[in-house]
Image (cartoon, coloured by chain):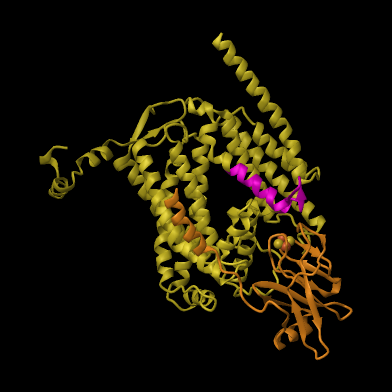
Amino acid sequence: MSNDTKSPLLSWLDERYQVSPLIEFLRHKEVPIGAHSMAWYFLGGATLFFFMVQIVTGVLLLMYYQPGEATSWESLRYIMTKVPFGWLVRSFHCWSAHLMIICLVAHMFSTMLLKAYRPPRELTWVTGYVLFAVALGFGFSGYLLPWNELSYFATVVGTDSVKSVPVVGNWLLEVMRGGPDVTINTLYRFFALHVIILPLACFALVGIHLLFIQRQGMAAPVGECHAPRGMKFFPSFAVRDLLLWLACLFLLVALSTVAPYGPNIPGMEWELGSKANPLAPAYPGIKPEWYFLWIYQLLKEFPPHLLGLEGPQLCLLLVSVLMGAWAAVPWMDRQARRNQPSPGFSDFGFAAILFISYLTLKAWDIGAVGNDVDAPASVASVARTCAWWELGLGGAIIAIRYTVYEHRWFLFSGAALLHAGLHGLAGIGYLAAGLVAMLPVVAGVVMIYRAQSRGEETAGA
Amino acid sequence: MGWLASVLYPVGRYLTPLPETGPTGPVNLTRGEIGKLEQDGFVIVPVVGKRVLVLEDSEGDIRALSARCTHEGCTVQYVADDSLIWCACHNAKFDLEGGVISGPPPKPLPRFYGERRDDGSVVINVVEQA
Ligand code: FES
């Protein structure tokens, strides 16, 4: 940019801070346009918008909220019943938290399915993954702050699984709770986590994540080192992003006013309810937030003891292995590393969606009969009904992938559907059905790996 | 390494909660707690940081057990009609000795000493029974 075309303000800034290179960078920055929809590129921005709403509404709530045995629940009731628009601020805070997680999940799966994690963007994936964990931490720590019955017992159950961590489990549990049990000390610790520690961590991680994206640009579609076309970041993409933020704001206003206490779906409701009483017995139907429901349900599927370990220990181990595998996808997906399509990993992503959705549907007790949802007849009915839902959902996804995207790799998602079918329709236990469904996957992967190795050998010869 | 340890050790110690204090020997239930026991057939009381379920069985004997479910830690309750202890979180059932009848808990509920004295007072001791 020549000096004479610059505005006086810009010249003034440039003289002092040398902002020209930055402006030049932004001026030339482009977003790749590939065969896939551009919509995926906006999910990260929407997540950032909801995060900013969290910060603003969180600060407003802090003006009245007082953590304490005799004040947490009371101050929140005061906010909701006495403070002008207090109910709206809290509703904004809760709705934007859920919408942020929804956008974050969609953003993560879109990154997975578009292989945007391939080199040189592995660390962008890792920072995004850690940000996702931090967001879940926000949800978990914030859940206890109202200090009501539901949040109390959900925290009791949620924190208890920490004791399954080998060697340091019990110590970790006590540090987390501030004692052997969930008490007001737990709330103090969660409060510090929710309003200081996690926001600081989040700011740092968002900064690094955005820096990586700005340095490397957004990923071009697989097979194209440089996208055939590009959209100017300024003003074209930025204006679209801004319009999306406006749409998000409208959505937030609409949801917060129409359903200020949530949509009344288990795991997505924030009625204040009764104050927590650690000496009252638990009641049926205590469930965590919707994004933890699959782990909650998985815990229920494990018997008390298995393979010499306690059920919750083994469950935690399985969840850790799955999460570890998810984090390591950029290194495991060797085809994507060579910028080639990797249909197996795309299918793995879809299978993960199906696996989580079946457990979540079951946790919602869809198809339960009678009042006792844990009665054997009701449990069988839930498994069956959810299996039909799952088969419908999975069938639709596969049909769309086959016809629209011409995918031909369905081994993992087929196994996820077989798992649901064997469990829900044939009545086989959840874990046993999972084992049976894994057999064709293992056989298929071994055969494909061998065929590939043979192909590479022939090519080498 | 030494520098890291010199930072982490005090932080770790600072975060580790101090052990609960309180009477380590037998404790008497308060009048309010006894009233609740008589009315509901059971009461949950805090003793040295533990939640203790005190119940009166069909024979009129006092029993004291940990009220913390061994599955995921929910607070259990006494169901007098079925003469069993129930955890509502995942529908677990325990017998009055604390043994698991059904459901996911991997261990029985720890048992404590509990007794009604001639003067009507109820005393419990959280030293675990064999
Ligand atoms: S916490 Fe009691 S059965 Fe799960």
Check if residue B93 falls in the magenta segment: no
Q: Image quadrant of ligand 1? A: bottom right
In this picture, is B32 found above or below A292?
Answer: below
- Colour of chain A in the rendered structure image: yellow
Q: In percent of the image, x 76 and y 57: which residue is there? A: B106
| Left or right, residue B47 beside residue B100 | left
Residue ranking furthest to the front = B2
Residue ranking furthest to the left = A4
Quarter holding the C terminus of chain A is top right
Magenta residues, dominant SS class: helix
| Left or right, residue B59 beside residue B119 | right
In this picture, is A405 found above or below A188?
Answer: above
Q: Position of residue A136 (x, y in %)?
A: 53, 54
Viewer-proximal residue among A237 and A106:
A106
In this picture, is A126 found above or below B73?
Answer: above
Q: In percent of the image, x 38 and y 27: which residue is there? A: A226
Viewer-proximal residue among A433 and A172:
A172
The reply to whether residue B72 is in sight is yes
Viewer-proximal residue among A33 and A293:
A293
| Left or right, residue A365 beside residue A87 | right
Q: Which chain is orange?
A: B
Quarter holding the N terminus of chain A is top left
Stretch of the chain drawn in magenta: A300-323
| Left or right, residue A445 beside residue A235 | right
Q: In percent of the image, x 76 and y 62: which residue is there? A: B91
